[in-house]
Image (spheres, coloured by chain):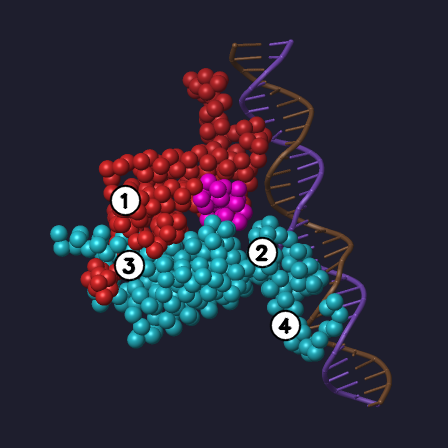
Chain colours: A cyan, B red, C purple, D brown
DNA sequence: CTCTCTCGACTGACCAGTCAATCTGGCGCA
DNA sequence: TGCGCCAGATTGACTGGTCAGTCGAGAGAG
């Protein structure tokens, strides 16, 4: 097995190895956690020599850096792009954001697990380096909320930053629950949850009948 | 300095040392993170010899265990107690839960930082041991939500487990934002946020005018 | 005299990162 | 066409430092 080196040229072959190391790192980090795995395990998983990891990366941390920045930037771009769509309602925009994040998990669960568990939720150790990038995501969501606050469709007494925290926090918690099997996982669950989380945060948990009377009284 | 052993008896003196080590651990873990501090630093902070730490605790992890379990149980009891109050509305119960958690952070920010950062948000490494305990908290909140779902004041299409995740996730995210200075901290902010997070999750971000029309069609 | 508390130097394991040696494939030159 | 050379790719044994946890000895109370 894996006998034929394939038709890859020497140059692209080199880049392939780098990519193979990154992919192997996703698998190993997801399985054992960043701190509980050895660099040698990443090398083994990638099928390369230990030293080669250090040919392509300065340190073990730089691998995680790379994985995070690469993926996070895609999300930041997606959020900015969603915000730009002027014909879409704010609730639909938030649905699109939730959708993007949940689909990311659906398609690349290991990568998302690593990003959430080792970076986003590890703000004290590794995530500290990336606090600014993480904050950018909150900012992007806050920008979406802000337009709704201005046009009166969202409550003005809840700041957009605070609202963004609640929204992102709810999504991340649900993802975390999936990661650690605290909530059931299935295609239907993923799809269903996109609507639920937006409904819960935008419309609230209370039924309209329960919350409406409080307004004018 | 520290010449006088004080009037503490020998028995209570011994227990004092144990407590001093726990308190020192809170300070050191909060400042440097569990993984980035040495046991010797905890001993120094407590003003005791290195070896004494291992007289009272089996391992570094057991110290964190102890800190977490001690505090988490208090919260579980509080949630259960709140749930038991039958004269209180569900929204008010959730306000009381938010209040309890936020006040915990207000009064013991270091301890709460350690619990959140090193246990609750570190489900892959250390938190894994305590997943069941953490789940209990979700369950307690879900139980509160469930009563409201049954009497029709909360939406029935959002499961109480899911709702609990959103609620707890939003609070934890806000606490995390305070811990890492992503949101402003002050007595007013703490007090104000209790109401905001409940209002956001129960009533929703949307103004009643924006969400109500969708009901009757 | 014994039991518990206290001490801190020491050990043993672990592992990230280094480095010198080897391989490979393309390219200039005769 | 064939030869020699170089640069980058690849290898894995080894080093250096770190630190959790151990242990044997001392102190003091009952």
Residue toward you, A185 or A112: A185
Residue A173: give x, y in percent of width and height. 42, 53
Of badges 2 and 1, nearer the viewer stands: 1
N-term-proximal mark, 4 vs 2: 4
Numbered disc in front, either 4 or 1: 1
Image quadrant of residue A141? bottom left
At horizontal 64% and vertical 71% (from top left) the residue drawn is A16
| Residue behind mark 4 | A15
The verdict on residue B180 being magenta is no
Question: Which residue is labeled 2 in the image?
Answer: A29
**Residue B135 in the image: x percent, y percent?**
44, 44
Q: CA distance from mark 4 to mark 2?
A: 21 Å
Mark 3–mark 1 distance (CA, rounded to whole Å): 17 Å
**Residue found at the far left of this picture:** A217
SS majority, magenta: helix
Chain holding disc 3: A
Which residue position is annotated with label 1?
B90
Marks 4 and 3, how far apart at CA: 48 Å
Kindly identify which residue carries mark 3.
A203
Side (left or right) of A22 relative to A119: right
Task: Tell me which segment is drawn in magenta.
Answer: B118-135
Chain under disc 2: A
B129 magenta-colored: yes
């Amino acid at each position: 097995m894996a006998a034929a080196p394939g038709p890859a040229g020497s140059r692209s072959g080199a880049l392939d190895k780098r990519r193979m190391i990154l992919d192997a790192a996703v698998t190993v980090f997801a399985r054992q956690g960043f701190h509980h795995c050895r660099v040698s395990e990443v090398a083994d998983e990638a099928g390369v020599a230990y030293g080669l990891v250090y040919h392509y990366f300065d340190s073990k941390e730089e691998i995680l850096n790379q994985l995070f920045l690469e993926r996070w930037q895609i999300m930041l771009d997606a959020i900015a792009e969603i915000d730009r769509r002027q014909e879409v309602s704010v609730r639909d925009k938030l649905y699109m954001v939730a959708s993007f994040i949940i689909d990311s998990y659906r398609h690349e669960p290991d990568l998302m697990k690593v990003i959430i568990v080792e970076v986003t939720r590890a703000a004290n150790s590794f995530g500290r380096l990336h606090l600014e990038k993480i904050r950018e995501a909150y900012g992007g969501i806050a920008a979406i909320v802000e337009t709704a606050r201005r046009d009166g469709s969202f409550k003005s007494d809840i700041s957009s930053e605070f609202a963004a925290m609640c929204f992102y926090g709810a999504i991340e918690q649900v993802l975390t629950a999936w990661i650690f099997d605290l909530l059931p996982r299935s295609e239907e669950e993923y799809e269903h949850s996109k609507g639920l989380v937006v409904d819960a945060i935008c419309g609230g948990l209370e039924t309209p009948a329960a919350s409406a009377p409080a307004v004018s009284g």
